[in-house]
Amino acid sequence: MPAPTPGCAVPRFSVIVPAYKVQAYLQESLDSVLSQSYADLELIAVDDASPDACGSIIDEYAARDPRVTAVHLAHNLGLGPARNVGLARATGDYLVFLDGDDTLAPGALQAITDRLKDTGSPDVLVYDYARIFWTGELVRNRLSHRLSEQGPASFRLADRPALLGMLMVVWNKAYRREYVEREGLSFPPGLYEDTPWTYPALLAAESVAVLDRVCVHYRQRRTGSILTTTSRRHLDIFDQYDRVFGYLGSRPELERWRPTVHRRMAEHFCALYADPRRLPRASRAEFFARASALLRRYRAPGPPPLSPSRTDRVRHTLMRAGLRRTYRTLSVLRSAALAAGRAAVLLGRGLRETGLRLHYRVQRLLPLRPELAVFSAYWHGGYACNPAAIEAKLRELAPRMRTAWICDPEHAGTLPPETAMLRPGSAAYWTALARATYLTTNVNFDRALVKRPGQVLLQTQHGTPLKRVGLDLQDRPAATPTTDFAGLLRGADQWDFLLSSNRHSTLVWEKAVPAAYTTLEYGYPRNDVFHRATEQDVLRLREKLGIPEGSTAILYAPTHRDYRRSRPEHLDFERVLRDLGPRFVLLRRTHLTYADAAVPPPVRHPRLIEVSSYPSVEELCLASDALVTDYSSLMFDYAALDRPMVIHADDWEAYEAARGTYFDLRSCPPGAIARTADELVDIFATGHWQGSRSAQLRAAFRARFCAFDDGHAAERVVRRVFLGQPVPVPAVIPPADRRPAPAAPSCTPAPASAPTLAPLTTPGLRP
């Protein structure tokens, strides 16, 4: 490898990207490197004589960015030798490898360099990856728990041998260049070239560290991947393991690793042999025989540090003994047993469901229980939103009532002790649905629910609709969660009451979900807490969340995007926090539709607090000094707090085209509007976020959408629905007389007690 040119700064990273027949993905791969927030890098892109446009793409990037070095090979050498060519030109402190169809996750290099500093510049840093499928699904490595950062910052591999059980690839690690030069590491020709690089790199390292963060998105291509192509080239694996054991033989101090490497080799052989896509039928017998020979040749006495399972021990023994027919027979028998087990499970599940349906029909013949009320929120989620506020007020005003909450077991801890948990699909669940007099939800109950005479169903909804809903989505199939509009209306026909937070919502719901329900314009019970909380409550919540005293806390809560499958990242948090300065803290709240998605962990920054899993969004609102959102209905709730809001609308046209909205938010926003991250920073840096113009916009917005949010919405609902009082009690408090919870003393926004702008009306709807 060349020494750095005198007088030239040595880059922190040399990122080596070989390219062969990846023209469809190469631009995204190179962009993912060059757009990193940590820019101290050189990118060495090697065109391995690719017959497509890879070479010209690399040249275009090299012409635009001086950090890019373009290398063109005269003949196709293969992935390993192409990486060696990149290695020969690398001058960075650390080497990072990236395949031409994979990408670096946003913020990856910053996270890597931070971890390198924290761990004393180890020889090798191992970080995590997520597989990104051609469908857009992102799935994190299932062995990510082995990258726990607990314990010593850096260590020898003997202290963490489980790392050898992870995917042995070159691109999930950063290597100190001096270490690579000292060890003379290089890539061999042929497939599985990562194997004779990765084992020596880890085994010989004097210091290893881990980073528990997804830094690479490993593309799973539908077609074109060599690892899913049937070819005799897969037999190259034997030469690669010959090289690994040759290396061990040349380093007596590493001989103790022979049993572990032998076990991993056996696992690798068995996995490749079991994959029907890789080996040609005519090569399978040869593969098994060569695998058997290598397993016998390099077998070492003594158990490996990581003991295989019983099934793996049987497979390894049969392959080592060359008993191919027995191996194949046992594999067939095991597959048959697994299939039989799945069939038995399905049969048992079918019998159970039949029994539960019969149980539900019997329960519907029994009398209703007038003292029983059942609640749910967010598709079997925890204790939250309007149903939770109503349930708490019901127990206060009608202590004779018994309440039950439908939720998955993982949310049981959110329930108050006075409320019984109902597991979805259980016998108790169906009993409650059959016999409870009152049913309350903010989404929908089970489609199999048969509403009985005398039952009262309250639909609270869970947000003021800015985006189009219900029947208004009939011409937008891309944004429609279901095309069963008839089923939607059948569910709405069971509603007795629909809770509305404002006149705008009333008009939208009556048109988008027409049915015979009674609309209750009472405000949102979940917002009552905004008028009950005190300054001491706010300070307690801020301390609980870890917000430093004297900081300005910004709650960042974007909504989901119907036009995207994966979760979008609209802000570079490290850059925004750097530009805002030490006085600001960001609370990041991911939309609940991304809760189960496998996504990279949050960016590590002392002033970025991840609150996506925090159970109460209302408490987050109380703890914050301002809200930054895009098109989330949270803005309508936050307006009741009379605290500053900023709209970050960087993709309004795309959002409007995909989902559709009931009015142009840009014409009547609740505060300042930022179209870019720079504008967002400027709004806060200049104080515009809490200036008089922002206060005027907020006042007009609050007058329009918070007419009923006075802190007594839950009481009005309970008295009307559960206690049968026809007149709304208590009466709505005028906005001028309301006193919402104050912000933290260090950041008190200008009040917006009275609107100074002309009243705004929803286009196409009566004010």
Image (cartoon, helix red, strand yellow):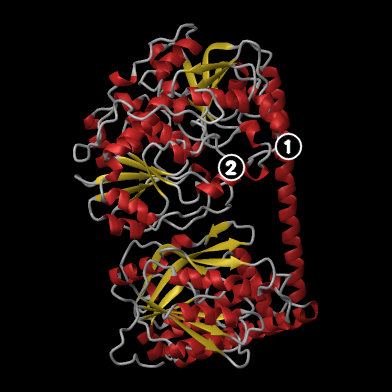
What quarter of the picture does the N terminus occupy?
bottom left
Is residue 597 rendered to the left or right of residue 619?
right
Is residue 243 rendered to the left or right of residue 128?
right
Q: Nearer the viewer, residue 226 or 742?
A: 742
Q: Nearer the viewer, residue 535 or 743?
A: 743
Q: Most extreme residue toward the right, as rendered?
A: 282
Q: Is residue 205 above or below residue 379?
A: below
Q: Nearer the viewer, residue 207 or 553?
A: 553
Q: Is residue 563 above or below residue 157?
A: above
Whole-percent x, y for residue 603 in the image = 38, 58
Is residue 708 rendered to the left or right of residue 101?
left
Where does label 2 land, which residue? 659
Query: Please, what is the three-letter code of the amino acid marked with disc 1?
Result: Gly
Residue at 69% over, 13% down: 365
Q: Is residue 370 above or below residue 585?
A: above
Whole-percent x, y for residue 7 in the image = 28, 89
Q: Secondary structure at mark 1?
A: helix
Whole-percent x, y for residue 398 in the image = 42, 11
Q: Residues within 10 Å of mark 1 (few under 14, many from 20)?
A: few
Disc number for residue 181 = none
Whole-percent x, y for residue 243 in the image = 55, 89
Query: Please, what is the three-letter code of the amino acid marked with disc 2?
Result: Arg
Q: Residues within 10 Å of mark 2 (few under 14, many from 20)?
A: many
Q: Nearer the viewer, residue 245 or 174?
A: 174
Q: Nearer the viewer, mark 1 or mark 2?
A: 2
Residue at 31% over, 56% down: 577
Where does label 1 land, which residue? 350
The mark nearer the N terminus, 1 or 2, is: 1
Q: Could you tell me how far apart the alpha carbons at marks 1 and 2 are, in whole angstroms?
A: 38 Å
Residue at 52% over, 54% down: 598
Q: Secondary structure at mark 2?
A: loop
